[in-house]
Image: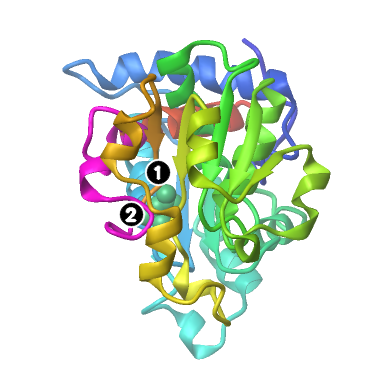
Amino acid sequence: MTKLSVRHLLGIKNLNENDIQTILDTATQFKEVINRPIKKVPSLRDITIANVFFENSTRTRLSFELAEKRLSADVVNFSASGSSVKKGETLLDTVNNILAMKVDMIVMRHSSPGAPHYLSSRIPANVVNAGDGTHEHPTQALLDAFSMREKLGDLAGKKIAIIGDITHSRVALSNIFCLQKLGAEVMVCGPSTLIPKHLGDLGVKISHNVKEALQWCEVANVLRIQLERQQIKYFPSLREYSLYYGINKAMLDELGKEIVLMHPGPINRGVELSSDAADSNHSIILNQVENGVAVRMAVLYLLAQQ
Ligand code: CP
């Protein structure tokens, strides 16, 4: 069996192409498993995993929990709200106390970029980054790549546009690293205030015209406007953002070509995507969610072999 080159999944930046292909190929096998009448395998029996979430989540948290249960792991869930973090307990003390209860693996979401990296150098357990602030969200990029590969085949040479709030998005950075390692061409599109100046250094194309981006790409991965991370105004109003960067079904139909529409969720309906686009035949948004379980099963299974 092929092994990963890493003990922790901290970001896509730390993976090589072989790691990514191994995860995607393993996820293909697990997708077949979770579509059987009996969706469980004993692969992680006697392994205990803690899902440690310091930030809100619907998809990632439930998807990890289901992935762990499908692999027969024992699971405990921790939310910062309602915990002793509110009494001032540190991140490291919190996690060391969880590990003292014989936990083998930590899946963590945290608002501080680098928090999982900090933890991984101080604890003996495997660490999986479930999103660290505006930095990386590696399992989202892997499930996005898996979903694109299912639709388009090998991603080498494919054109992928990432459209929206790039500045505040951990999904954008992980997707850029992942898609480039798989040989795809990447464009980012949004208002100049929502595209970091250094992004051109990563070798991505940059556009400020959403129609140009849609014409260019085979896949449009649309990102949420993250108002909760914005300390200043990056555009005059949501209405104006929607007018210039919002995507609706008519825009996709008018392209006269096949285009795959993606969004990591949660969607701001009527802002970056209209409901008729999000729910259209172009959209694979719910396929992304389905694939998240198989991809996370693959990640946990492969890390447990390290
Ligand atoms: N895509 C994603 O990370 O969604 P959640 O914040 O609901 O986990």
Relative height, residue 237 to residue 205 (above, below): below
Q: Which mark is residue 267?
A: 2
The answer to whether 140 appears left or right of 20 in the picture is left
Question: Please, what secondary structure does the residue beneath circle 1 have?
Answer: loop
Residue 129 at least partly seen = no
Residue 120 included in the magenta stretch of the image: no
| Residue at disc 1, CB closer than 8 Å to ligand 1 | no
* Residue in view at x 53 percent, y 56 percent: 108
Relative height, residue 180 to residue 121 (above, below): above
Tell me how the rendering is colored: rainbow
Could you tell me how far apart the alpha carbons at marks 2 and 1 are, in whole angstroms? 7 Å
The answer to whether 110 appears left or right of 286 in the picture is right
* Residue in view at x 33 percent, y 50 percent: 273
Name the amino acid type tagged 2.
Ile
Residue 121 at least partly seen = yes
In the foreground, 78 or 199? 199
Classify 10 Å Cα crowding around label 1: few (below 14), some (14-19), many (20 and above). Answer: many
The residue sitting at the bottom extreme is: 87
Residue 130 placement (x, y as % from top left): 52, 51
| Residue at disc 2, CB closer than 8 Å to ligand 1 | no
In the foreground, 44 or 119? 119
Residue 277 placement (x, y as % from top left): 27, 41
Q: Magenta residues?
A: 266-289
Prevailing SS of the magenta stretch: loop
* Residue in view at x 53 percent, y 32 percent: 142
Name the amino acid type tagged 1.
His
Q: Which mark is residue 263?
A: 1
Question: Please, what secondary structure does the residue beneath circle 2 have?
Answer: loop
Quadrant the N terminus occupies: top right
Residue 153 placement (x, y as % from top left): 49, 11
Relative height, residue 154 to residue 295 (above, below): above
